[in-house]
Amino acid sequence: MTGVCGCCGALRPRYKRLVDNIFPEDPEDGLVKANMEKLTFYALSAPEKLDRIGAYLSERLSRDVARHRYGYVCIAMEALDQLLMACHCQSINLFVESFLKMVRKLLESDKPSLQILGTNSFVKFANIEEDTPSYHRSYDFFVSRFSEMCHSSYEDPDIRTKIRMAGIKGLQGVVRKTVNDELQANIWDPQHMDKIVPSLLFNLQSGERTESRSPSPLQASEKEKESPVELTERCFRELLGRAAYGNIKNAVTPVLMHLDNHSLWEGKTFAVRCFKIIMYSIQSQHSHLVIQQLLGHLDANSKNSATVRAGIVEVLLEAAAIAASGSVGPTVLEVFNTLLRQLRLSVDYELTGSYDGSTNIGTKIIKAHEERQLQEAVIRTIGSFANTLPTYQRSEVMLFIMGKIPVPGVHLALPSTGSGPEGTRMIQIMLLKSLVQVTAGFQTTNMLTALPSSFLEPLLSFSLTEDPEVRLLVLQILLSLIDRHDNRPKFSNISIISDISVLKLKVDKCSRQDNLFMKKHGQQLYRHIYLGCKEQSSGRQHYETLFALLGLLSVELANEEVVVDLIRLALALQDLALSTDEGLPVFNRCAVHALAAAYLNLICQLTTVPAFCQHIHEGSVFVLRLPSSLEKVEGDVLFLQSKITEVLGGSGYNTDRLATPYVPQYTDEDRLSKRKSIGETISLQVEVESRNSPEKEEVKKKMKYLQLMDSVGMEEQERERRRQVVEKFQKAPFEEIAAHSVTIALFSFLLPSRPPPSPSGTISSGYGQNQSRSVPIYEMKFPDLCVY
């Protein structure tokens, strides 16, 4: 019988005998290296036998696994690994099928050591570049199995960690093997990404607490460096780094879903960390795709809790800070439109107390303080996005936000859902706060193009409202727009400085564009500064901001003509402080007087005219305690217009203009300014320069509404005037009426009545005065008493 067995053994195929010879009698001795070299040489010499070698090894391994002979299992896998590394012939595909079959057998085992063994072999295989493509190979099982291992809940924590790390490495291997192989099933398909990405995030999250308590990198041990969280982050970065333009959405969507399902937006920290990894890992030109997905997700969660929405907004804030300039993408205004819509919804939720405007028992309870935190986060995010934009796009965003400010009684760009006038006011304040963020750090060389009339005039008209918070926000926006050399902090307090060189002001020569800007808008700025000082509700911060605005105008946009006008304005403010006709409280009058004195002290040193400086320094006296009356303020503490005109005239300044007191021209805009709501103060002089702006029609509607309201007021005034005339003629003595009629006739003859307004309007003369057009004699209208 022994001879028969020996004879049958000799008849076995050579590849089987070579395979059998690599297994020792005792598995503890390990692989027989000499025989392994013979098997490798045979496989290289006869590549057509490679698939049979693989099939036989697979058969032996399956038998050993079933018999729990794990020593021989390890030897078989080691032999397979060496054959894979050595052979790259065209027949490798069939061998790989046997290899993957054996790896799958190991991964299906419930023994952790075999799972890890199979994973390590797969990782080695994943790093091999095959010479020939495979048309029918599938990795679906491996994606599913490795994802399961990433979520292992094995009792022993050390073994659990090893299993999870093996799962992460396996997923990394699958990605490497398939991501660049067009013949393989697309690893970016949602069915695969929905397994891979959550598995990675699960391990990233589970190691977050451990990482926060971990020692510094210099003290970390080798075991600490190989923790699941570190390995996961490397794998996640590699996955994202390989994502092409069309794959970004499939890679990011599972992240959003994972954060939703596990309520991770509220904590913010983990969500921010995830998207930092994403933004730093993907190609920079794809950043706007991630931002657009976040914006869409924010809209989808519009009726979720404020903490969830705030978490998404916080992630947007961080993403915008990381994104390169201009990476917001082609739909810039849509980004801001989404954020402004969320701002409006938050205001409505806060005031109505529900997400659907009803008071049903089943509605969620809304916490006002959480909504306010969300609103502040949205405003910060708007500023963060604006900082990534070039100047011309930031100007468009400013105009876009300005067009969103609602006007009561008109179709709102941001319709309210029932929050009423208070909601409208809150939205207006939030939008102005957004403008403060957008204009922060605004830099431009051409003020005319960066600040068109369609933006600047409505903004200035907002400064005339009764709401002190609104006026302060408008002033802060103006400061940001005008300050181009970071001089603003140097005018933070109203104070007299004997030598302004300590301020180290940065003053450049006024450019031609700046001159044109001040020629067009200077009088508007002066008038709004003057009227702002007259507001009784103004506080210390208002006057300090007005002083800063005057100071910035002097160092940023002042030529000789502007300097003269600013001095006239300061002297007019001094007269305002002394006047009792305006009914200003003592505090306001003292503040206006201090502002005028501090500004004249500044401007005199900027002009560097010694006699002017001497006169100002002599009158620069501050009253530290508020007096009960300013009626007796005179003499040395006042700045005299005649004296200033005299000393500046000798230095070449326009004496005629200096000698003319500044008187602000009141317009229809000022009548509108005293309405209760800021939205009702939009100027009638708004001109829409941006023809392609989506806000053009909205601004026109606002103008028509305000013109209608103004015409109603004019009609009431006209009726009142007529009533008084009729009453006078009914009750006045005959002699008085006769004398009045003769006087009117004489003046009408000597000074012909003004013709009706022509379509071209009036001609504007110097300093804002109007002249009537000359009218032909045959068009003049004479009283009946003077016509024969």
Image (cartoon, rainbow, N blue to C red):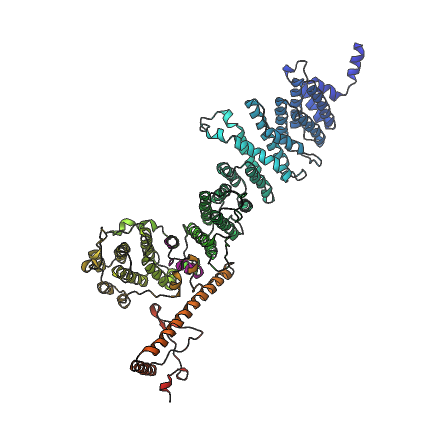
Outermost residue toward the front? 731
Point out the image quarter for the N terminus: top right
Q: Position of residue 541 (x, y in %)?
A: 33, 51
Question: Magenta residues, as a range?
Answer: 453-471
In which quadrant is the C terminus drawn?
bottom left
Q: 354 or 313, which lies in front?
A: 354
- The residue located at (63%, 15%) in the rendering is 28
Q: Main secondary structure of the magenta part?
A: helix
Above or below — where is 722 with respect to 310? below
211 and 373: which one is in front?
Answer: 373
Q: Nearer the viewer, residue 161 or 352?
A: 352
Q: Position of residue 425 (x, y in %)?
A: 43, 53
In this orientation, does residue 31 appear? no
Q: Would you place residue 741 above or below residue 481 in this image?
A: below
Indicate left or right for 88 with 217 as reference: right
Residue name at image x 36 percent, y 86 percent: 785
- Residue pushed farthest bottom? 788
Q: Is residue 531 above or below residue 57?
A: below
The image shows residue 726 at horizontal and vertical percentages of: 37, 76
Image location of residue 200, percent across then percent down: 57, 33
Which image quarter: residue 153? top right
